[in-house]
Image (spheres, rainbow, N blue to C red):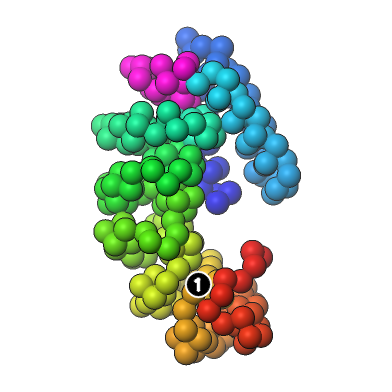
Amino acid sequence: MTRVVALLLALLSARCSSPGTSDLLVELSQRRELYDDALDSQDAFRVEVEAATIGRLARERFPELLEGLASSDPAKQDAAAFALGFSRHRGAIDPLAAATGSARPAIRAFAIAALGMLGFREVPMEPFRKLLDDEDPRVRLSALFGLRHLAGPGCPTPVLEAVHVRLSDPAMGIRNEAVLVLGKVGGAAALEMLLSRALRDPEALVRQNVARVLGTVRGPAERTVPALKELLKDEDPSVVRAAQTSLRWIEGAHVDTPAPDR
């Protein structure tokens, strides 16, 4: 998550320095820097505090953010979409969903990530399915990041299939994010997708997260345990450690139930 958010913030930083931006954009830029520092520190409490501060600002100045999103100024659009993701305001759903259809990749990326961050059940899933096949890798990554806030049992089959395709994406970060989304979805279909491709991904980070997810995804032990034992032979120590942890969880009579967050 941290890497994905950092990428989105890097996109935003290039926009917020544009001349003529409003006081709100300046304030959002300052809050972004503090949020970025919190992410870099990997201090969960700091991240939570800064996210709450941006969320409060977004709710207090919600009408201005909607105006910014609807404006023709790219800097205002991008900053508004970024902040609206923290707002937890249902009034942001339709404007953000509309912005995912923009011709400009940056606003598509910000809007789809923010749409997922809202976290409401009524958020439309079709924009995620569509942007998972976007030509711009930043947009595909942002779609997965946003989807991770919404994914769970009952994920629509077309969306799940679109996530499955991303397990073969040329970009390692996108494949890794797809693994994490499948872990949130859980169930037999997601499990089979993980076992069919991601288990043999060329990147150790992806295989490590597959090992972690296999300890959390709901599925029969006769499918997950052999896969984890295969990962015990991995050449990367981090993959082996993750597989060992998941095996201990499954073999400790916690089969078919989610493991705690690690």
Question: Three-letter amino acid code at disc 1?
Answer: Val
Identify the residue at horizontal 64%, vertical 64% (top origin). 261
Whether 180 is drawn above or below 123: the answer is below
Determine which residue is flagged by label 1.
217
Identify the residue at horizontal 47%, vertical 21% (top origin). 65
Q: Is residue 157 left or right of residue 206?
A: left
The prevailing secondary structure element of the residues shown in magenta is: helix
Residue range highlighted in magenta: 63-80
Find out whether residue 78 is within the magenta segment: yes
Q: Nearer the viewer, residue 120 or 25?
A: 120
Q: Position of residue 47 (x, y in %)?
A: 67, 41
Q: Nearer the viewer, residue 133 or 169?
A: 133
Find out whether residue 23 is within the magenta segment: no
Whether 115 is drawn above or below 59: the answer is below
Q: Position of residue 231 (x, y in %)?
A: 53, 83
Disc 1 crowd, CA 10 A, few/some/many (<14, 14-19, 20+) = many
Q: Nearer the viewer, residue 228 or 124?
A: 124
Q: How many marks?
A: 1
Q: Position of residue 97 (x, y in %)?
A: 34, 35
Is any part of residue 231 visible from this angle?
no
* Secondary element at tag 1: loop
Q: Position of residue 124 (x, y in %)?
A: 33, 44
Q: Is residue 238 left or right of residue 78?
A: right
Which quarter of the rendering shows the C terminus?
bottom right
Identify the residue at horizontal 67%, vertical 41% (top origin). 48
Is any part of residue 111 visible from this angle?
yes
Whether 244 is drawn above or below 137: the answer is below
Identify the residue at horizontal 45%, vertical 51% (top origin). 150
Q: Is residue 209 left or right of residue 115?
A: right
